[in-house]
Image (spheres, coloured by chain):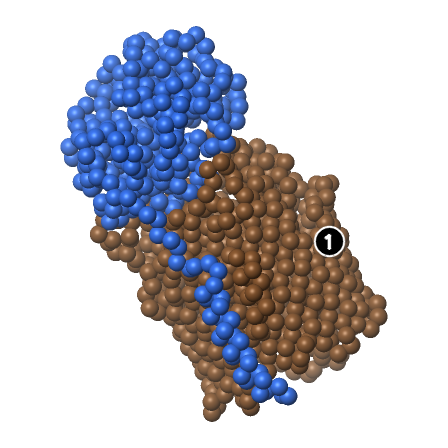
Chain colours: A brown, B blue
Amino acid sequence: MRSCLLFLLFVLLAGTQVRGQQTLDTIALHNVVIVAPRLSDFASGLKTQAIDSATMARYRSADLGTLLEMESPIFIKSYGLGSLASSSFRGGSANHTAVLWNGFNIGGPMNGQIDLSLVPVGIVDEVSIQYGGASALWGSGAVGGSVLLNSTPVFDSGLTVDAGASFGSFGDRRQHFHFVRSTSKWISSISLFNTAARNDFLYSNPELLGTPEQRQRNAELAQYGLLAENHFRIDQRQRLSLRFWYQNSDRNIPPILAQANSSANQQDQSYRATAEWQRLGTKVNSYVRAAYFDERLQWYGTSTDSAANSRSRTLIAEAEMRIRIASGQRINIGLNNTFAEARSDGFPERQQQNRTALFASYRINTTNERSNTTLSLRQEMVAQELVPFTWSLGGEYELRKWLTAKANVARVYRIPTFNDLYWTPGGNPDLLPESGYSGEAGLGAKGQLRPGVKATAEGTFFQRTMDNWIIWLPAGAYWSPQNIMNVWSRGVELRGELAWRVGGATMKLAAMTNYVVSTNQTAKTVNDASVDKQLIYVPIYSGHGKLTVRYKGLLATAGVNYTGYRYTSTDNREYLDPYVLVNASVSYRMSAGKKYIADLMLQGFNLFDADYQVMLGRPMPLRNFQIGLSVRFNQANSTPEEQP
Amino acid sequence: MIRNHFLGKALPLALILFMLITLSACRKDKPEQPEETPITIGNDHGVYITNEGNFQWGNAKVSYYDIATDNATEDLYQPANGVALGDVCQSMVLFNNKAYVVVNNSGKVVVVDPNTFVATATITGFTSPRYFLPVSNGKAYVTELSGNAVRVVDLNTHTITGSIPCAGMTQELVLAYGKAFVTNESKAYVYVIDTATDAITDSVPVSRGGNSIVEDANGKLWVACTGGSGTSPALYRIDPQTAQVEAAFTYSNSATNPWRLRINGSNDTLYFLRGGVYRMAITDAAAPVSAFIPTDGRNLYGLGIDPNTGTLYLADAVDYVQRGMIYRYRPDGTLLGTFFAGIIPGGFCFR
């Protein structure tokens, strides 16, 4: 096994989407202030994937879970249309994917993760996926990879109003309204969004005699929210950004295939407010950020007497400095303090936790940016206890103009969640953080095959060992989490893209394949047959293919996604069958002058009626459609205001 | 582009080669199919094992072990009916040549032919059924974890004909002197139901966490309670005629407290789980302090005693997410053998 993978590593002659040209420090363009997040600056050697703007537009009214499922190799454990969605990134658990909104980790303290079905793609402009362990940069949970959600303010863009509505199968209706006033000094924007769906799709129930056709029941969804952003350019060097995101979600929880009925309901309510001040100097950039998150979850079971409530509040404060110490050498140093408190029906009393982390990075690059190396360090303290000292070392080297090599090794960790520590009964306050080592190496190539034909290719091998992996095991009458498993994950990811022109049309063909082996290495009890077996719900093979055609205002895409077998028992005797989903979309952009743009979009999902289950016992919809129209108006500032 | 030529040829080649290797090497995508030995249930003695499966995964199974041939089959229901049994199979009872299989989170009791395991009827309308007790030829009671009631079932029409209000989570129950004695996990009482009137007529104060109940050779009832909320884990001996506790055998609270109380065929020896297996004669003056069969690193989850031979069947649920292992012991505690069942084996039903 090991030698086989080593062999694969050596055959790795497929490439990376070289991001050298995107490696930005802080560049103040005329109207745009681009502030490189730690991602592109200090994540040397890690594979990254930015979701392109056309794809972002297509998923604008969708949730993050759907976007990642369709466009990234992250396996999304979706419990059904509109239902809970968690992730498995490179064979990790749902707690091993860090999700950061404008630099703040939004994984709640209760279970250390965020329900990806509750994050609307439309709240940000950019989604990037950073593969691999980056605990030294992002802290606990950045183990399998990180999902970075960012918005970049654009000053002096005038008045913009953007409104849209869509209708879909199963009573799906979505609306958004976005208003921005942007001058050279300040930006004020507000977004409102609303989603409602019945989700009463038809499916054949394989669990009932005669596999009768049934309509999904109790799956209604109502979600609305507001995002307000204000950015102020205090002077040429200083900027203040304020953001507020409120969201309310009310979902019924449908029955599983083997259940006759369900009347369960879940309500999630969240308030997230952030502030960031930054000063960009010639040598030193300073940042001070703060965030306050308040999340409530109320769950009502099918029987009248079952209910669960929880509420958590998180206060994050962070200060960071980026110093150019010499030509091609930069250091980043920062301090983060995260205070979380939670109440839950599962805890006897309110629980609190304070975490402090000191982090630093040193990056050196050649003047032509053909190579760079970064060393990062992080020491976190949780409730006065030091968690494993974390580091990462990575680099990127342009071997040829068209060929780049990257490699990264890192120590990674994940601290126990409040549920792990305090749940009554069973919570184990003596749990240690999960920790391990992760490494990856990849090659990327890009170039012009012949005039008008561009190709990029990327191949990455990764491996990770994780010790003290927390699982809940029986401890008598109840379950209790233990630091018991050791998990070895490894795999190969390939990605290729070919773009060419035919007449006035631009064609793009993209494909990615993923091979992920993630196995338990320790027997949990004497009869445990799970040693050296694949973890449940981690597909070994998966792949995506997508063809995009753009002709004038017309944009058409057709995508195919394959998800391989997923085991549902730890001894790998039980499994779910693979499935292939074929989706397509057509959109047409009309514009009137420079001010008006209208986009009409038609999307079809699961066009070949695949009858599949992502999670055992949870039905998924057959062929379904969505049609949407959005209109955008932009009025540039009449007299360009003078630059300060 | 200086290296167009090389790139144009080598790159696609390398890509194709690499994809081929990736797709062919290392781990197969298609899992190995588990071998199944077909089994025919004859007139011989055998044991049905109810496997809960995982809550909300719908992977409950009923396994069968043929004592004479030492053969086991993991699932009887799916091959016989073409569909899976449902979500969380809690228990099973044989009565008048029919098998009543209680499928907890599917809210149903499936009536099957015990020989072919083909379903002949389904009783629906339960909230969270746990245990089934026939109280006459035409009537049975079914306890419910939630629903705050014990359901009355007509065995001829296969319908729920009534509900006996009983707050809390009702568990195992037993019939004695025309009355049903019902344990209740969330209350500190055993409730007494008059089977003629289908009404609660009395209650017996015990510890909380009452979960299992058996009748001994002297006509006395024994109850196992896990304790909680200030009450001690304990075994109680109850006189069913007076509905009074005759004796209490308490334990101090620990991680594992008494449950799965069973009695042998001659109704004179009690067995229960408390981590390991504990054994107690009905005449003993004190509860046993050490395990008769120790845990030995296993996750002991189910216990059954063959009424004909006294053989103990002990289920190890391992990590709850893989097939469990069943251990067979002689009444003296010597190991006879092992076989595999389904995921989370919890109940045994002997024929």
Q: Is residue A102 above or below residue B288?
A: below
Q: Position of residue A459 (x, y in %)?
A: 56, 70
Determine the image quadrant of residue A360: bottom right
Q: Position of residue A190 (x, y in %)?
A: 58, 65
> Is residue A622 visible to the viewer in this orientation of the structure?
yes
Q: How many marks?
A: 1
Q: Position of residue A256 (x, y in %)?
A: 36, 48
The residue pinned by badge 1 equals A378
Chain to which mark 1 belongs: A
Tell me which residue sits at (30%, 24%) in the image. Answer: B306
Tell me which residue sits at (27%, 16%) in the image. Answer: B176
Which of the two residues, B109 or A219, is positioned nearer the viewer here? B109
* Quarter of the figure with the C terminus of chain A: bottom right
Which of the two residues, B126 or B93, is positioned nearer the viewer here? B93
Q: Residue furthest left?
A: B156
Q: Is residue A600 above or below residue A240?
A: below
Label 1 residue SS: strand
Q: Is residue B195 left or right of residue A137?
A: left
Q: Is residue B169 above or below residue A543?
A: above
Which of the two residues, B348 or A323, is positioned nearer the viewer here? B348
Tell me which residue sits at (73%, 67%) in the image. Answer: A373
> Is residue B191 visible to the viewer in this orientation of the structure?
no
Q: Is residue A189 left or right of residue B324?
A: right
Q: Position of residue A32 (x, y in %)?
A: 68, 75
Task: Give the crowd class for mark 1: few <14, some 14-19, many >=20 residues within 10 Å.
Answer: many
Say what amino acid the circle numbered 1 marks. Arg
Tell me which residue sits at (69%, 49%) in the image. Answer: A338
